[in-house]
Image (cartoon, rainbow, N blue to C red):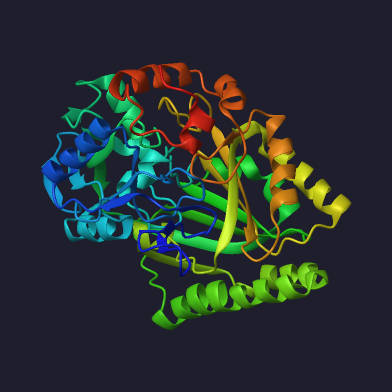
Amino acid sequence: MGERAPDGAGPDAWRNWARTESARPRRVARPRDVAALAAEVAAATASGTRLRAVGAGHSFSGAAVTDGVHVHLDALDRVERVVPRPDGTTHVTVGAGIRLHALNRELAARGLAMRNLGDIDRQSVAGAISTGTHGTGARLGGLPTQVVGLRVVTAAGDVVEASPDHEPELFELARLGLGTAGVLAAVTLEVVPAFRLLAREEPMPLPAVLEGLDDLVDGHDHFEFFWFPHTASTLTKRNDVAQDEHLPLPRWRRALDDELLSNVAFGAAQEVAARTARWTPHLNRFQGASLPPRTYTAASHDVLVSRRRVRFREAEYAVPRESVRDVVAELASWFRATRAHVPFPLEVRFAAADDVWLSTAHGRETAYVAVQQYHRLPHGRYFEAARRIVAEVGGRPHWGKMHDLTHADLAPLYPRLADANRVRGRVDPTGTFRNPYVDRVLGLPG
């Protein structure tokens, strides 16, 4: 769920986690079951009121904003069905409001796991797939590629089961469509037997990372790196399915690294940079050297997910994988030329090409470049520079992150965007699920 807006904004005022977006909906609904959800949607359509579902509020964009009805799906959080498949996978149907961290626990209790995860797990399943949340792994797709079925409440209040074989066009729009196909009531995911990862985290110089990037990306199940601006320092993460290794991380070490260093000390460094900008390069050098290397094994979700308590703003772009070295080099040149003060690391991840209509990895092997800035520091000049640089290589903005691109900018980047709008026009002819952000990035339905 998002957070309450500042005092005086009204009892139902809402804002997202990053505090980049807020809303004052006319009404807030918390349906207890699918029938109540369908009634809410049908009533909104009949009265000509806009309606948006809201999850955990972890989107940095205006995807969930509305002045109409805000629907919270928290009560739709049960594991409904677990169906083993002949190929060794399992189809698990869950309420769309379940948070990813709760889903991970439920799956682990059944000896199951998601193939891949993003680096946070606070989102609802509905919000995560609807905005194209992804992790990292050259042979792995984002969360929407793990979806095999959906229960959708359309604008008319109809409850429709959609899959690749039944209502396939609705399925395509609903599994990644910013909530424009309808409100998701349940999601069926293809999951795999639970597995452990061997995690190796260590600093590497940026030139060495870029020179050996293909081997690092292709040679590991999951690879990503964090680069600290104003330095040549990176933190690399190489995660592979564990075989016989058993190297549990001591509890004290996890508390030291993941809480004290990665959150408490990191947050303190951000505050110092916000008050004394000229110290930023020194702080980044310190941050790059402060996290010691470590190797350990743990359950997949314990390795892939990090707890990020320091509030920040983020823009993220999907670029062709072969272009990512040039993008990082251009950003490094921009930092040298401008001496901009950015104490937050830049994150680079990777994904396989997929065929999801509105996926940022549609049709191409992809590298994701995430630029982040502490929430008390200005971000506009930095984010604009990143947007200009990635535009040269056809960068696609993450649907849930900050950007100012419009439908005119995005239409050439998405060969199936016209199909998505055609289906929007069919399933939501009254525009119940529209909002200003959706209109800006997707254009008008029909």
Would you say 20 lies left or right of 251 here?
A: right
Figure quadrant of the N terminus: bottom left
Tally the numbered discs: 0
Q: Quadrant of residue 83?
A: top left
**Residue 188 makes an appearance in the image:** no
Question: Which is more toward the observer, 82 or 438?
Answer: 438
Q: Return the x and y of residue 41 as percentages of the image width and height.
A: 23, 37
Question: Which is more toward the observer, 359 or 157?
Answer: 157
Q: Residue at x 25, y 44 (%)?
A: 191
Q: Return the x and y of residue 65 as percentages of the image width and height.
A: 43, 46
Question: Which is more toward the observer, 4 or 94?
Answer: 4
Would you say 272 lies left or right of 429 here?
A: right
Q: Is 250 above or below relative to 302?
A: below
Q: Return the x and y of residue 22 as percentages of the image width and height.
A: 48, 54
Question: Which is more toward the observer, 48 or 153?
Answer: 48
Q: Is 290 above or below relative to 299?
A: below
Would you say 262 lies left or right of 290 here?
A: left
Figure quadrant of the C terminus: top left
Q: Quadrant of residue 120?
A: bottom left
Q: Is 446 above or below relative to 335?
A: above
Q: Residue at x 65, y 66 (%)?
A: 376
Q: Return the x and y of residue 349 as percentages of the image width and height.
A: 55, 46
**Residue 142 makes an appearance in the image:** yes
- Residue farthest along the right direction in this orientation: 337
Q: Residue at x 75, y 49 (%)?
A: 381
